[in-house]
Amino acid sequence: MIPLIYVLAVSLMMFTVGLYGILTVKGGIRLLISIEILVNSANLNIVAWGVGIADASAVLFVLFSIAIAAAEAAVGFAIFVALYRETKNIGLKSLMELRW
């Protein structure tokens, strides 16, 4: 069995990559991917602790979280498809221009 500290270290690295992606990204699709990496790192962390304390409810919580993340990704991609149809660009600056 893999020690808990190794799984938590991988989760921390995934969280760091996702946070870096959110802070430095200029494209919409990359932003969604960075958010998904953050959510997956949190899910990995929850599952690791759930297995560590032998609690099956953590796995069920993660399954619901994955379903919600899939719905969030679908809505995000739909927004970017609509944005591309309107402006022929999916950059985040073009998203800000649609506000006004």
Image (cartoon, helix red, strand yellow):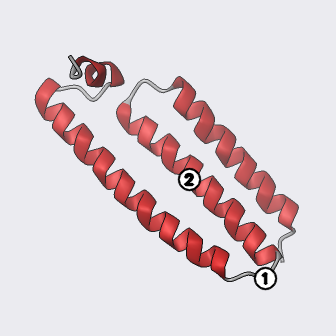
Residue drawn at x 55%, y 49% as measured from the top left: 37
Q: Position of residue 81 (x, y in %)?
A: 20, 41
Secondary structure beneath dot 1 equals loop
Q: Which mark is residue 71?
A: none
* Direction from residue 96 to residue 38 in the image, left or right: right
Residue drawn at x 16%, y 24% as measured from the top left: 87
Secondary structure beneath dot 2 equals helix
Q: Position of residue 80 (x, y in %)?
A: 26, 38
Quarter occupied by residue 57: bottom right
Quarter occupied by residue 49: bottom right
Q: In terms of sequence position, does the residue under pointer 2 or pointer 1 come before the other?
A: 2
Q: Which residue ends up furthest to the left in the rendered image?
A: 86
Observer-nearest of 5 and 72: 72
Tell me: residue 12, above or below residue 49.
above
Crowding at mark 2 (Cα within 10 Å: few <14, some 14-19, many 20+): some
Q: Which residue is mark 1?
A: 54
Q: Which mark is residue 39?
A: 2
Tell me: residue 10, above or below residue 89.
below
Residue drawn at x 62%, y 76% as measured from the top left: 59
The image shows a total of numbered marks equal to 2
Q: Amino acid at mark 1?
A: Ala
Q: Amino acid at mark 2?
A: Val
Q: Position of residue 51 (x, y in %)?
A: 76, 77
Tell me: residue 44, above or below residue 36.
below
Q: Quadrant of the N terminus?
A: bottom right
Crowding at mark 1 (Cα within 10 Å: few <14, some 14-19, many 20+): few
Q: Position of residue 85 (x, y in %)?
A: 12, 34
Q: Quadrant of the C terminus?
A: top left
